[in-house]
């Protein structure tokens, strides 16, 4: 640990001694901390056009046409609204400065803007090659599969998908944290990056009634493949956009692109498209925002410290007697903040969607095989990690500051 890093850690420890009680004080500290989160991103992202109103509502459009809307508790949080929809977590949105004016009266009053019908129509049509790729993939399946064989083919494809790309658990990090920004977008997403779809076994949907049970999938596949090629674009538009609305996903951005969980609707269509191996799916996407702080049982402290020591997390661990808390500046793969079983499942899913991406982040291949291998590597000291005694001193200072801040 060099002198500048040590100074930064000490400054954070003593800064934590200042109580943060009022919403205005919380907003002040949030605005002061945000530059560190932005500075951890080491690549330039795409340009954005941004409108921010007095309530903190954000409407933004990227150079590639991506629409993002959301809410920011302070003006300095606008890049955090945009970054979940960059090409990866290492990219810094090239957004215009929104000023350092006083925080608006919205710290505890979030808004939740959402794409309207016009926004959805525009996003659906914005990149016609996605629809063309989708229709081409369906035409290829039609060429390969006989109509009578569709149910058997669907079941075989589901079995292979369960073995090759099993679903992962839903990712949650800190649902108790007070909201300080939110973000949503809409557009075409890579179907193979959807790694969780409510019903956890591909092809098995536990719904009551014949029309919504697992049998819907082969019936829908047969209907899809029987559609006349000339009518297929309109058929897809109806079922992916107009009829029930788009599939609704949670976007979990990673170092080279996002993974997705299902959010509130579209399980049947998601299972169908993944089983058929279709390349694209139109969806709304609500961003998973990496929290500022997490609190877990004390055993998680070593996992978090391992992430810091291996360069996978910018943050500071505060150890108590039974519990530990983590202050987070930046984590390029936010699922790594979860317990090893969940982190390892997401690591494997990310490697399937973005081969080699975690290796380029510094994770060796042998650490990606399972939860045990991941935890073992994480707890193995990195060559550049600070000495244990110095780490304990820093943790003591952080805990002392936190205790002082809690005093009346």
Image (cartoon, rainbow, N blue to C red):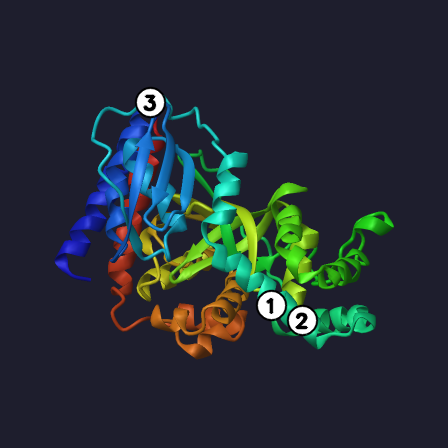
Q: Residue placed at 78% from the left, 53% from the top?
A: 206
Closer-to-camera residue (283/172): 283
- The residue most toward the bottom is 366
Earlier-in-chain disc, 1 versus 3: 3
Which residue is label 1 attached to? 137
> Dot 3, crowdedness within 10 Å: few (<14), some or many (≥20)?
few
Q: Secondary structure at mark 1?
A: helix
* Residue 319 at least partly seen: no
Q: Which residue is mark 2?
A: 141
Question: Could you tell me which secondary element the residue under label 3 belongs to?
Answer: loop
| Residues at circles 1 and 2 in contact by the CB criterion of under 8 Å | yes
Judging from the image, what secondary structure is the residue with disc 2 in? helix
Dot in front, 1 or 3: 1
Which quadrant, please, contains the N terminus? bottom left
Distance in Å between CA atoms under marks 1 and 3? 46 Å
**In the picture, which quadrant includes the C terminus?**
top left
Determine whether, in the image, residue 278 is placed left or right of residue 174.
right
Of marks 2 and 3, the one in the foreground: 2
Residue lying at the far front of the rendered structure: 230
Cα separation, mark 1 vs mark 2, equals 6 Å
Depth check, front residue: 137 or 92: 137
Residue labelled with disc 3: 54
**148 on left or right of 192:** right
Q: Is residue 47 above or below residue 146?
A: above
Residue toward you, 68 or 208:
68
Residues marked 1 and 3 touching at CB (< 8 Å):
no
């Amino acid at each position: 640990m060099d002198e500048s890093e040590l100074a930064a850690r000490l400054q954070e420890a003593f800064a934590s001694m200042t109580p943060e009680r009022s919403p205005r004080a919380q907003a002040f500290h949030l605005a002061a901390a945000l530059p560190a989160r932005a500075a951890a991103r080491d690549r330039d992202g795409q340009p954005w056009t941004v409108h921010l109103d007095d309530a903190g509502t954000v409407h933004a459009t990227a150079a590639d046409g991506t629409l993002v809307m959301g809410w920011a508790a302070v003006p300095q949080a606008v890049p955090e609204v945009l970054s979940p929809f960059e090409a990866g977590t290492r990219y810094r949105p090239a957004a215009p400065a929104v000023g350092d004016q006083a925080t608006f009266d919205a710290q505890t009053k979030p808004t939740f803007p959402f794409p309207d019908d016009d926004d959805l129509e525009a996003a659906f049509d914005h990149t016609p090659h996605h629809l063309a790729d989708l229709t081409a993939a369906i035409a290829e399946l039609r060429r390969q599969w006989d109509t009578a064989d569709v149910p058997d083919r669907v079941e075989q494809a589901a079995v292979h998908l369960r073995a090759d790309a099993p679903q992962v658990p839903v990712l949650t990090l800190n649902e108790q944290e007070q909201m300080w920004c939110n973000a949503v977008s809409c557009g075409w997403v890579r179907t193979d990056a959807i790694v969780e779809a409510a019903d956890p076994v591909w092809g098995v949907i536990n719904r009551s009634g014949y029309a919504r049970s697992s049998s819907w999938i082969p019936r829908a596949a047969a209907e899809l493949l029987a559609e006349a090629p000339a009518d297929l674009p309109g058929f897809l538009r109806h079922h992916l956009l107009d009829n029930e609305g788009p599939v609704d996903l949670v976007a979990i951005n990673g170092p080279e692109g996002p993974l997705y969980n299902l959010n509130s609707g579209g399980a049947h269509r998601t299972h169908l498209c993944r089983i058929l191996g279709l390349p694209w799916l139109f969806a709304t996407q609500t961003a998973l925002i990496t929290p500022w702080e997490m609190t877990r049982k004390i055993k998680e402290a070593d996992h978090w410290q391992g992430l810091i020591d291996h360069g996978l997390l910018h943050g500071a661990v505060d150890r108590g007697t039974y519990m530990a808390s983590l202050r987070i500046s930046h984590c390029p793969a936010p699922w790594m903040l979860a317990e090893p079983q969940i982190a390892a499942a997401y690591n494997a899913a990310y490697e399937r969607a973005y081969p080699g991406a975690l290796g380029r982040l510094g994770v060796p291949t042998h650490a990606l095989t399972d939860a045990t291998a991941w935890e073992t590597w994480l707890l193995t000291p990195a060559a550049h990690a600070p000495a244990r005694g110095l780490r304990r001193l820093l943790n003591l200072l952080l805990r002392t500051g936190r205790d002082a801040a809690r005093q009346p």
